[in-house]
Image (cartoon, rainbow, N blue to C red):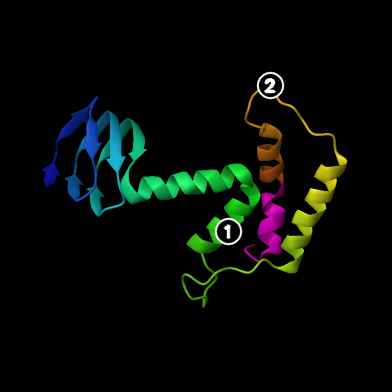
């Protein structure tokens, strides 16, 4: 369906297979399953996402990978989304020896360190460590 110049406010908006031109969205919930969508000249003032269908399941899987090893997940995702020029899409990436060495060193350091028992079930120290080492991993993988 095509929408032109409409104002959507405080409602759920299905994006898949719809076209929006010159529309305004205020405090809406975008529902998206990965289908075709067209947005042109639209204004957005407060929105959230609900991913459904195959896209929702795929993003849930990526979230699980990220939770288990954030740096590796980000590295592999960036390689898949932004392959080096001349690399065939869908080619499984190989970890360079320098990246593998980084992970081995981290595992040795983690084994030597006393395990943390955070009050919050999410271990933010792993997230912070991942963010700190992301540039080093990107350089080692040849992305910088």
Figure check: 91 above or below 39: below
Which quarter shows the C terminus? Answer: bottom right
Between label 2 and label 1, give the one nearer the viewer. Answer: 2
- Asked where in the image residue 47 lies, by quadrant, the reply is top left
Asked whether residue 141 is drawn in magenta, I would say yes
- Asked where in the image residue 28 lies, by quadrant, the reply is top left
Coordinates of residue 77 in the picture (x, y in percent) = 53, 56
Residue drawn at point x = 72 percent, y = 55 percent? 136
Coordinates of residue 68 in the picture (x, y in percent) = 62, 44
Task: Look at the numbered disc 2 and give the secondary structure of its residue.
Answer: loop
Residue ranking furthest to the top = 119
Answer left or right for 107 relative to 75: right
Task: Look at the numbered disc 1 and give the secondary structure of its residue.
Answer: helix
Residue drawn at point x = 75 percent, y = 67 percent? 97
Give the magenta-colored segment's residue range: 133-143
Residue drawn at point x = 28 percent, y = 39 percent? 31
Where does label 2 land, which residue? Answer: 119
Nearer the N terminus, badge 2 or badge 1? 1
Asked whether residue 41 is drawn in magenta, I would say no
Main SS of the magenta segment? helix
Where does label 1 land, which residue? Answer: 76
């Amino acid at each position: 369906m095509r929408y032109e110049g409409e104002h959507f406010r405080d409602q759920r908006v299905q994006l898949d297979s719809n076209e929006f031109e010159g529309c305004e969205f205020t405090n809406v919930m975008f529902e998206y399953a990965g289908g075709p969508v067209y947005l042109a000249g639209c204004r957005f003032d407060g929105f959230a996402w609900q991913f459904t269908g195959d896209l929702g399941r795929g993003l849930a899987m990526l979230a699980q990978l990220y939770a288990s090893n954030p740096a590796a997940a980000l590295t592999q995702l960036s390689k898949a989304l932004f392959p080096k020029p001349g690399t065939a899409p869908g080619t499984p990436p190989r970890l360079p020896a320098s990246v593998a060495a980084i992970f081995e060193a981290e595992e040795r350091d983690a084994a030597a360190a006393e395990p943390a028992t955070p009050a919050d079930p999410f271990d933010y120290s792993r997230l912070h460590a991942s963010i700190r080492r992301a540039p080093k991993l990107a350089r080692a993988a040849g992305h910088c």
